[in-house]
Image (cartoon, helix red, strand yellow):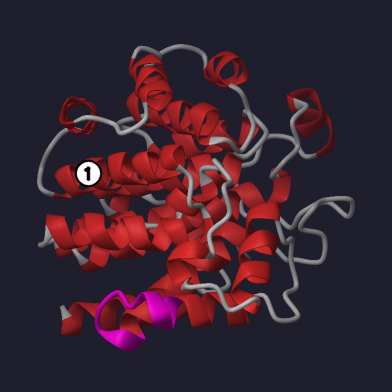
C-alpha cells in the first residue's frame, strides 16, 4: 500500500503542476490556439493569474498541499495549530495568486479569531483538493483521516458543501488505497451519505458521466472553482480515464477553467489506483519540488 500511497501524492502534485500553464483559462479555443495540447509541465502565460512562476512549479493549491505535507512531517501527526501557522507563513510575500478564500482566512487569522472560526465561507473545491498528504499519513486510520480532513479544510473553506466534498474525496481515496476500484469506492462513499443534498445530486451526475466527451461534460457541469461544478468534473475524469492517468490529466487541463483543483483530486485517486508506473517520468522529475516531496514522504513513512 505504501507504494500506491506514494503514487497518490505524486500524481496529485503532478496534476497541479501540469495545470499551471493553462490554469483558469476558460475558453478552450484559447488554450488550443495559444498553448496547444498540454502534455508537459509549462510556465504560465504572461497574462496568467500565476504569471512569474516557472515550469514545474505549483499553483497556490499545490503550494498549500506542500505546506500540509511539510507540517505532517514536522509534527508527526496532523496539528491544526502547526498547519495554520505554516499556511499563514506561506502567504507572507507570496509569489503567486491569493484567492478570496485565502484573503478572507488571512484577515481572520490576523484578527486573532479561533482557528475553527477563521475559514471563509467559500464553496470552492480548492480547500478540499489538497488532502493527498493527509490520506497518505492516515492511510491506516480512516477515522483519524476524516477528522483531520475536516479540520484542515475548514481552516480556509468552512462551507458545508466543501466539507462534505472533502469527506467524500477522502473516503474514496482511502478505499482505493485499500484495493477498491475507483467507481466502487465512489459509490461506497456516496452510499455512506454526503452531508449536502445539492452536492449529493451533483456527485450522482458525475458518476453518470463516465466515458462521455470530457470537454462537453466539464463545460456542462461548469469549469468554475465551486465544488458543485468541479467535483463532478473530477469524478468524470476518474471514471473515464481509470486506466490512463496521463491522458486523463491532460484532458483535464484541455477542458479549461479550474483544472488545478480538479486535477489534484483526479490525480490523487488515479495515482492511488494505478501506481507510480502510470505517472510520466518527465512530470514526476520535472516538478521543482520533486526531491523535497520525496524526502518528506520518506520522513512521514518512517514516522507512521
In the depicted view, which residue is nearer to us: 209 or 193?
193
| Residue under the point 58% across and 79% down | 112
Task: Please give the residue where the numbered disc 1 appears in the rendered image.
Answer: 171
**Which residue extends farthest right?**
47
Q: Quadrant of the C terminus?
A: bottom left
**Residue bounds of the magenta highlight:** 74-83
Residue 81 located within the stretch drawn in magenta: yes
Name above or below for residue 242 compared with residue 292. above
SS label for mark 1: helix
**Residue 159 at x, y = what percent?**
48, 45
Q: Quadrant of residue 257?
A: top right
Quick check: is 96 in the magenta stretch?
A: no
Location of the N terminus by quadrant is bottom left
What residue is rendered at 79% in x and 53% in y? Answer: 49
User: Is 232 situated left or right of 106 in this image?
Assistant: left
* Image: 34 above or below 50: above
Image mark count:
1
Query: Residue 221's quadrant in the figure?
Result: top right
Asked which quadrant contains residue 151, the reply is: bottom left
Instruction: Give the image location of residue 91, x and y in percent.
Output: 67, 75
Left or right? Give the position of 185 relative to 237.
Answer: left
Return the residue found at the far bottom. 74
| Residue 302 place in picture, x, y as percent | 18, 84
Report if residue 136 is visible in the image. yes
Magenta-drawn stretch, dominant element (helix, strand or loop): helix
Q: Determine if residue 70 is in view.
A: no
- Badge 1 density bin: few <14, some 14–19, many ≥20, Cα 10 Å: many
Amino acid at each position: 500500500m505504501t507504494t500506491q500511497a506514494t503514487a497518490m501524492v505524486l500524481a496529485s502534485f503532478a496534476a497541479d503542476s501540469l495545470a499551471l500553464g493553462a490554469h483558469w483559462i476558460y475558453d478552450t479555443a484559447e488554450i488550443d490556439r495559444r498553448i496547444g495540447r498540454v502534455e508537459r509541465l509549462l510556465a504560465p502565460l504572461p497574462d496568467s493569474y500565476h504569471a512569474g512562476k516557472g515550469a514545474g512549479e505549483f499553483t497556490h493549491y499545490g503550494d498549500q498541499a506542500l505546506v500540509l505535507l511539510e507540517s505532517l512531517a514536522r509534527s508527526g501527526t496532523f496539528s491544526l495549530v502547526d498547519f495554520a501557522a505554516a499556511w499563514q507563513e506561506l502567504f507572507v510575500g507570496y509569489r503567486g495568486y491569493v484567492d478570496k478564500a485565502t484573503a478572507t482566512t488571512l484577515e481572520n487569522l490576523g484578527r486573532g479569531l479561533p482557528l475553527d472560526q477563521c475559514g471563509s465561507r467559500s464553496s470552492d473545491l480548492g480547500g478540499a483538493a489538497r488532502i493527498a498528504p493527509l490520506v497518505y499519513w492516515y492511510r491506516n486510520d480512516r477515522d483519524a483521516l476524516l477528522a483531520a480532513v475536516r479540520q484542515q479544510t475548514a481552516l480556509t473553506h468552512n462551507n458545508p458543501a466543501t466539507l462534505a466534498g472533502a469527506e467524500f474525496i477522502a473516503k474514496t481515496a482511502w478505499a482505493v488505497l485499500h484495493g477498491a476500484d475507483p467507481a466502487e469506492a465512489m459509490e461506497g462513499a456516496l452510499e455512506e451519505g454526503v452531508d449536502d443534498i445539492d452536492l449529493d445530486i451533483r456527485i450522482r451526475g458525475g458518476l453518470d458521466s463516465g466515458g462521455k466527451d470530457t470537454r462537453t461534460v466539464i463545460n456542462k457541469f461548469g469549469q468554475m472553482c465551486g465544488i458543485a461544478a468541479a467535483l463532478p468534473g473530477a469524478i468524470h475524469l476518474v471514471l473515464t480515464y481509470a486506466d490512463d492517468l496521463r491522458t486523463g490529466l491532460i484532458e483535464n487541463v484541455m477542458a479549461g477553467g479550474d483544472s488545478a483543483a480538479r486535477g489534484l483530486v483526479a490525480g490523487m485517486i488515479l495515482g492511488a489506483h494505478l501506481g507510480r508506473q502510470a505517472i510520466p517520468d518527465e512530470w514526476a522529475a520535472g516538478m521543482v519540488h520533486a526531491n523535497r516531496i520525496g524526502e518528506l514522504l520518506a520522513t512521514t513513512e518512517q514516522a507512521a
